[in-house]
Image (cartoon, rainbow, N blue to C red):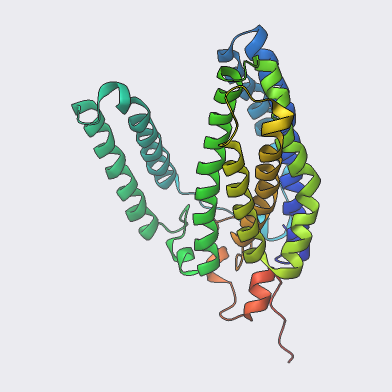
Amino acid sequence: MFGQGVGRNKALGMWGGLGAAGATVGLITGGLLTGHAGWDCIFFLNVPIGSHPWHSRRGWSPGGAYQARRRYDPLGALTATGGRMLLVHAMSTAPQDGWSSPKTIGTLATAGVLLVAFVVVERRAEAPLLPLRMLRNRAVASANLAGLLLGGSFFAFIFIGTFSMQQALGHPALRTGLTWLATPLSSVALAGLAQVLVTRIGAGPVMAAGMATIVGGTRWATQVPVRGTFWADLAAGLILACAGTAFAFISISVARLIGVGEATLASPRTWTTRPRSRRRGDIERGDQPRRQRR
């Protein structure tokens, strides 16, 4: 839908800003539900939110090349989803069941078999869910690795921060949700700047700066005293981490699509029709390759 370059970068910047705005609403809603209705009620929110785009999907069917008949990879989806679900389940229950228990070992082994099967399926599928040849693109491979580190570190930061606010600082659920508003508000404010910087200097430097800022914010948060206060001890660390998240998320989103003809990894046209060579500066900025003169 959006070609590589300024248009796609702006779209991804808006997407990141809207995602942060949704997180703002989610934090407040989650605090209200947890404080007044119980924490398990938050899972029911997925039903109406997920059903709306499902029922309205027909109205979002774009034209052009997207109208072509699409092939799918159900076996790849099943093996990838099943393998990751079992892996997360095994790691979540291992502290209670024991890492050497038959249940944990069996679950981990099954998860490993499914993930290996996923790789085999993707190598043979006509329209793979995850074309393995995409990993030959250094920018895409690096961006996916950075995305893994970003997700793992930042969500762990949110979990530990929430636990610290409620257990150490004594904040109730709603106040904790309001405290986390610094996170999405910083991301909303900086999403536009992030996409501008990615367009001008490239995704790599912006990504590195964002990840370094997250490290600095996390390091700051580790120094919060037990009897500290939000504004005096915790606010600066949260704002730093959230600012870094905006820069890292937008740059990673752009870099993941470098060299991709369409904004999807499931389409075979993504990797069979891309140009063979590009100037390094154009690739880092996410620019379209210049057309050769006839």
The answer to whether residue 141 of the structure is visible from this angle is yes
Say which of 195 and 62 sits in front: 195
Task: Count the numbered circles shown.
Answer: 0
Question: Does 96 sit above or below residue 37?
Answer: below
> For this view, does 52 lie left or right of residue 134?
right
Question: Does 294 sit above or below residue 199?
Answer: below
Q: Position of residue 261 (x, y in %)?
A: 63, 65
Say which of 286 and 259 sits in front: 286
Residue located at (29% from left, 43% from top): 112
Image quadrant in which the N terminus is located: bottom right
The answer to whether residue 268 of the structure is visible from this angle is no
Image quadrant in which the C terminus is located: bottom right
Q: In which quarter of the image is residue 170?
A: top right
Q: Quadrant of residue 207?
A: bottom right
Residue located at (69% from left, 23% from top): 177
Q: Position of residue 253 (x, y in %)?
A: 63, 54
Residue located at (62% from left, 78% from top): 280
Residue located at (30% from left, 21% from top): 96
Q: Position of residue 190 (x, y in %)?
A: 78, 49
Q: Residue furthest bottom?
A: 294
Q: Position of residue 163 (x, y in %)?
A: 55, 23
Say which of 231 and 146 sits in front: 231
Q: Which residue lies furthest to the top in this view?
A: 36
> For this view, does 84 lie left or right of residue 139?
left
Say which of 13 and 57 sits in front: 13
Question: Does 259 sit above or below residue 20?
Answer: below
